[in-house]
Amino acid sequence: MTEQILALALMLNPDHDRAAQAHLARLAGRLGFVACHLPVSEGGVIPESDMAVLIAAADPAMLVIDHGQDAMGVVRTANPAAIREVRASLDASEDDRPLVVAVPISIGRTLNEAVARADLDPRFAGDAHPRISGIFGTFEQAQEQVLAIAEAGAEVLLVTVPDERDVADVLAQVRALVVGATPALLAR
């Protein structure tokens, strides 16, 4: 079994049609993500046939309907201090929910590639930009950020990836952040 420092989950793009969402879910499931979150506005209805398609596509990952509410155990920043604070709160309450860090991510082979990916996605405007609230930079920079998130006590990393034509490459890079050499770096 491959050592993994955080479980991975993917936030599906609500602006995509169901076929594109199913494609992302299929890629995430095959890459070992544990869940695909489908953002739905409160009271939003998803046809049963769409649900069946997305559930089948994501398998073996779970499909989670995400209403976007802040809940105990969900941190929407990559700030290690904020993650440690929530970790301490969960531990004090003996709450056994996993600590989920839900953040945007934009990584690239170069910093310019990470910038370009993030800047092209309208969901990453303002405070939602990965440079501000998420994981951002080269692979090595992102690796350091993921290590800090894991060391702060997170258990699940829920990522919003840029709307990129080469999304399979982006998802593979994200997967590589939590397996392979990264867990060995945690032991340093």
Image (cartoon, rainbow, N blue to C red):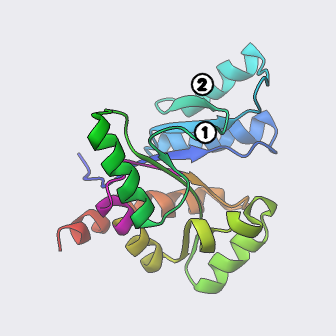
Q: Which range is magenta?
A: 148-158
Q: Is residue 147 above or below residue 44?
A: below
Q: Is residue 2 above or below residue 135?
A: above
Q: Quadrant of residue 20?
A: top right
The answer, for residue 180, to whether it is visible in the render is no
Quadrant occupied by the C terminus: bottom left
Residue matched to label 2: 55
Residue in the image at 40% along x and 65% along y: 81
Residue 22: x percent and y percent? 68, 36
Residue in the image at 59% along x and 84% along y: 111
Q: Amino acid at mark 2?
A: Ile
Q: Of 105 and 174, which appears nearest the observer?
A: 105
Residue matched to label 1: 25
Q: Of 106 and 153, which appears nearest the observer?
A: 153
Q: Of 75 and 2, which appears nearest the observer?
A: 75
Residue 125: x percent and y percent? 77, 66
